[in-house]
Image (cartoon, coloured by chain):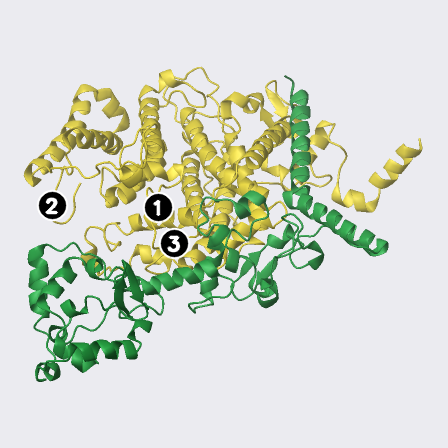
Chain colours: A yellow, B green
């Protein structure tokens, strides 16, 4: 037929064949070639176990987070065509995007809602990985990388928030950076800042803002961080994150052997063989090992039949990923058409909105400020939370329930993590819906124009009793479980046990102190001239 | 649902969203108004060829960009006939700018919102005209439109802004600047008379009464009633009476001739400026100078001699 002849002439031409180096992926060879010889697709292996396709295992969250990052980079680049980080024109540029730029309002909306979605998806992805214990050996470091990626995501959100230069932006960053000034030692308002000669013009807040005020210096700094530095760091970290997944054997799953109760350290099907005993050739010629081998002939070698539970990545995985991508794009698109990204008045340092609330992912921290001093609520608690999260793989002494949702086999871990997540989201809900002007308590049906009493009479524990109380709390908290649950303590070993219990005690102390504050009006457990807890 | 079916639905959804997006983007509100404008313009041009070409003018995004301020005013995107005399008397938004203000106020340089306020950057009716949340310079309507004239026209009497001018005059006349700073040239202006030597001018009794309620003696006085307690007014009067003018105090007291004075009053036409008579319940005289009917209670004779 003429059309087939024409098709052949095109697809056999030099131009075509230099781009599409092999045929349509219908045969096992072509499918393998498609994956291996394509720069983007060779993130994947050539074949995967069937279980890795299970949607209800991963929910595709990691991939969705990455897609959202890609959407953000794309829309972000387009936005930088129209936005100049100058305090005199940033706000008008936002108005121009809304009214004058073709598809400007859509572009900005996609960017804003993708950012919120990405923060949510990253949190959900972390929860999923935790609940399937996919951080177990040898994947501990990848979990740490993931925590780092989550922090970078939040930093990207924070830096981007300033750019519209409206009241929301200005005051959110003011609150955030003022919390930084309460950092112990290096913040000019933090405990012990005298020791290092730290002042308002040389502390960590000054470093963040490039000045003592949220002004032009801060804007250009945040712009550069948001558009160049943080995305670059994120991209590199994500690349390592994917690399580690591949090297650690792809999507996690339970160990094949039935001896789940036998103490094995390796829970996963890892392609990494146990290291062979090193050959002792003291005087032999120098040698090296290769990961790949030179093969004469076509690109691939070593044909293997797929096992019973293996499928080829093309098209099975790739198609599912594409579907997930289409879904995400459609959802973000609908949100972008329906809801406009907020833009309040031009930033005005003389007028503080009351209340000036942070976006939802930070409003939990802001709510904590009602119960703790800034150096605790804004610096210590987030740092300890990030440290605690990163330490999870190293503190987990349980080796059951890995690679699947097996809550019954991991009661302690699942309970503690779920408790933590629920605490965090309760703080967010309170901060979002139950706080009004002057951060007073307003039920959703109450009128914000009616002022409420915000200052209450509080009292502090005397220093002696406070110190004693803390010693008893942590002392008993460490000693009692060791006595009552000795197998638990033994399994962990002393170092891990102590760290785990300290973190758990700190986590319980947060709602504990909130309760004491709400019921007894107790402000400080420990009250010293240098710092208060 | 099989994956292929889901793929079909998702793809279709994105296609539909794409179409929605494009149709929303290419049918903005302002095109409707501009299209109507050109249709109206076509009916107003006599020459058929020129009318046809006017009616077929391509719809364009218009704005006036004030370089110095970095402000873009997009009012003319709908108000396209603002400087077209053919559009005199047409309905809004097509009508030409009424009056002769546009010839002396080059909107192509200063834009529209400099005088009219409103969200000039907006291209929809609601965002430009209505009370837009978070836009703190709403469109000025009715008499308020004259408010911004004073940005450049600092004088008291601003042409074509009668309400503004009246307001400025009132501010001046009623002595508001005596207590309220207005951020204008009026600030620092002395509202009341100098009190140096007041003790040699007025009588103690009059001063007491004046301090208790100034407008009881002089209804159009600028000084408001401060609702002083009697002891306070007394104390104040006692203090003020110590402000003496030595020259007046050292003048000899001399008895004057009442009839000669009365005749002098008539011949000097004092009544042209001052109220000097009351005839059948009506006050007779001008209001350029103060009412003199009760002047005897107020001022000290020595002072009056010196004044005259």
Q: Tell me residue B42's x, y (percent).
A: 78, 51
> Disc 3 or 1, which lies upstream in sequence?
3
Q: CA distance from mark 2 to mark 1?
A: 33 Å
Classed neighbour count for the residue bearing mark 1: other residues with Cα under 10 Å, few (<14), some (14–19), many (≥20): few
In this rendering, is residue B36 above or below A188? above
Is residue A275 among the parts visible in the rendering?
Answer: no
Residue A464: percent from left, percent from top: 6, 39
| A62 or A13, nearer to the observer | A62
Which residue lies under the disc numbered 3?
Answer: A348
Res A91 visible: yes
Provide the chain ID for the residue under circle 2: A
Residue depicted at x 40% and y 49% = A167
Among numbered discs 2 and 1, the one appearing first in the sequence:
1
Answer above or below: position of A251 versus B298.
above
Q: Nearer the viewer, residue B280 or B221?
A: B280
Of B262 and A98, nearer the camera is B262
User: Which one is closest to the eye, mark 3 or mark 2?
Assistant: 3
Determine the residue positioned at 40% across, 28% down.
Answer: A130
What residue did someone put label 1 on? A353
Residue B145, placed above or below residue A380: below
Subunit of mark 1? A
SS of the residue at dot 1?
loop
Which is more N-terminal, label 2 or label 3? Answer: 3
Marks 3,2: beta carbons within 8 A: no
Quadrant including the N terminus of chain B? top right
In this rendering, position of residue B71 left or right of residue A300:
left
Callout 2 secondary element:
loop
Instruction: Quadrant for the C terminus of chain B, please.
Output: bottom left
Verify CB contact (< 8 Å) between mark 3 and mark 1. Answer: no
Position in image of residue A226 (x %, y %): 47, 50
Q: Is residue A379 left or right of residue B229?
A: right
Give the residue at mark 2: A528
């Amino acid at each position: 037929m003429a059309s087939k002849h024409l098709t052949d002439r095109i697809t056999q031409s030099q131009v075509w064949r230099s781009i599409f180096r092999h045929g349509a992926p219908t045969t096992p060879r072509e499918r393998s070639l498609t994956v291996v010889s394509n720069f983007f697709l060779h993130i994947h292996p050539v074949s995967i176990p069937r279980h890795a396709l299970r949607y209800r295992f991963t929910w595709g969250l990691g991939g969705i987070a990455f897609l959202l990052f890609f959407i953000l980079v794309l829309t972000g680049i387009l936005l930088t065509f129209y936005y100049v980080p100058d305090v005199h024109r940033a706000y008008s540029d936002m108005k121009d995007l809304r009214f004058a730029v073709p598809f400007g309002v859509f572009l900005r909306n996609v960017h804003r809602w993708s950012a919120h979605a990405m923060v949510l998806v990253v949190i959900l992805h972390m929860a999923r990985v935790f609940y399937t214990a996919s951080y177990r050996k040898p994947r501990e470091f990848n979990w740490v990388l993931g925590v780092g990626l989550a922090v970078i995501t939040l930093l990207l959100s924070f830096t981007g928030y300033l750019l519209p230069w409206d009241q929301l932006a200005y005051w959110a960053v003011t609150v955030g950076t003022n919390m930084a000034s309460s950092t112990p030692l290096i913040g000019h308002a933090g405990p012990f800042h005298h020791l290092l000669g730290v002042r308002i013009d040389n502390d960590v807040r000054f470093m963040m803002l490039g000045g003592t005020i949220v002004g032009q210096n801060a804007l250009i700094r945040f712009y550069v961080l948001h558009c160049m530095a943080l995305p670059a760091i994120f991209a590199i970290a994500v690349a390592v994150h994917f690399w580690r997944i591949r090297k650690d054997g792809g999507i996690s799953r339970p160990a094949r052997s039935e001896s789940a109760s036998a103490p094995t350290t390796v829970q996963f099907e890892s392609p990494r063989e146990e290291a062979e005993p090193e050959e002792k050739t003291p005087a032999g010629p120098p040698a090296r090992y290769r990961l790949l081998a030179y093969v004469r002939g076509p690109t691939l070698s070593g044909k293997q039949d797929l096992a019973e539970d293996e499928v080829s990545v093309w098209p099975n995985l790739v198609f599912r990923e594409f579907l997930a991508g289409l879904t995400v794009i459609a959802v973000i698109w609908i949100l972008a058409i329906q809801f406009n990204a907020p833009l309040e008045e031009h930033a005005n340092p003389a007028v503080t909105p009351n209340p000036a609330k942070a976006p939802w992912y930070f409003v939990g921290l802001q709510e904590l400020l009602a119960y703790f001093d800034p150096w605790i609520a804004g610096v210590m608690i987030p740092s300890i939370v990030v440290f605690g999260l990163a330490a999870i793989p190293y503190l987990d002494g349980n080796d059951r329930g890995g690679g699947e949702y097996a809550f019954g086999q991991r009661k302690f871990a699942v309970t503690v993590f779920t408790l933590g997540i629920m605490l965090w989201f309760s703080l967010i809900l309170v901060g979002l819906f139950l706080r009004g002007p002057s951060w007073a308590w307003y039920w959703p049906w109450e009128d914000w124009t009616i002022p409420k009493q915000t200052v209450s009479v509080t009292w502090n524990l005397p220093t002696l009793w406070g110190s004693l109380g803390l010693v008893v709390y942590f002392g008993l908290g460490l000693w009692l479980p060791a006595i009552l649950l000795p197998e638990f303590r033994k399994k962990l070993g002393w170092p891990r046990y102590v760290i785990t219990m300290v973190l758990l005690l700190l986590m319980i102390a947060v709602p504990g102190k909130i309760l004491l504050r709400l019921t007894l009006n107790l402000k400080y457990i420990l009250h010293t001239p240098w710092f208060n807890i | 649902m099989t994956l292929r079916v889901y793929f079909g639905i998702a793809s279709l959804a994105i296609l539909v969203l794409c179409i929605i997006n494009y149709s929303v983007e290419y049918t903005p509100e302002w095109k409707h108004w501009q299209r109507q404008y050109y249709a109206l313009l076509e009916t107003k041009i006599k020459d058929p060829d020129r009318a046809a070409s006017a009616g077929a003018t391509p719809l364009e995004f218009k704005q006036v960009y004030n370089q110095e301020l970095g402000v873009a005013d997009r009012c003319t995107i709908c108000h396209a006939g603002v400087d077209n005399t053919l559009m005199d008397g047409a309905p809004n938004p097509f009508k030409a700018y009424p009056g002769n203000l546009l010839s002396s106020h080059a909107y192509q340089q200063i834009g529209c919102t400099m005088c009219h306020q409103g969200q000039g950057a907006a291209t929809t009716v609601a965002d430009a005209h209505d009370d837009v949340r978070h836009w703190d310079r709403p469109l000025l309507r009715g008499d308020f439109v004259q408010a911004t004239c004073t940005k450049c026209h600092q004088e008291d009497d601003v042409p074509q802004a009668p309400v503004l001018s009246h307001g400025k005059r009132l501010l001046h006349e009623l002595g508001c600047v005596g207590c309220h700073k207005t951020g204008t040239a009026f600030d620092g202006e002395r509202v009341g008379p100098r009190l140096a030597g007041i003790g040699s001018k007025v009588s103690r009794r009059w001063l007491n009464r004046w301090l208790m309620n100034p407008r009881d003696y002089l209804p159009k006085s600028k000084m408001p009633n401060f609702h002083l307690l009697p002891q306070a007014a007394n104390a104040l009067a006692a203090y003020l009476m110590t402000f003496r003018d030595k020259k007046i105090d050292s003048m000899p007291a001399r008895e004057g001739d009442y009839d000669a004075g009365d005749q002098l009053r008539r011949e000097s036409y004092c009544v042209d400026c001052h109220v000097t008579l009351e005839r059948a319940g009506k006050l007779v005289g001008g209001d350029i100078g103060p009412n003199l009917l009760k002047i005897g209670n107020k001022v000290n004779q020595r002072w009056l001699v010196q004044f005259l």
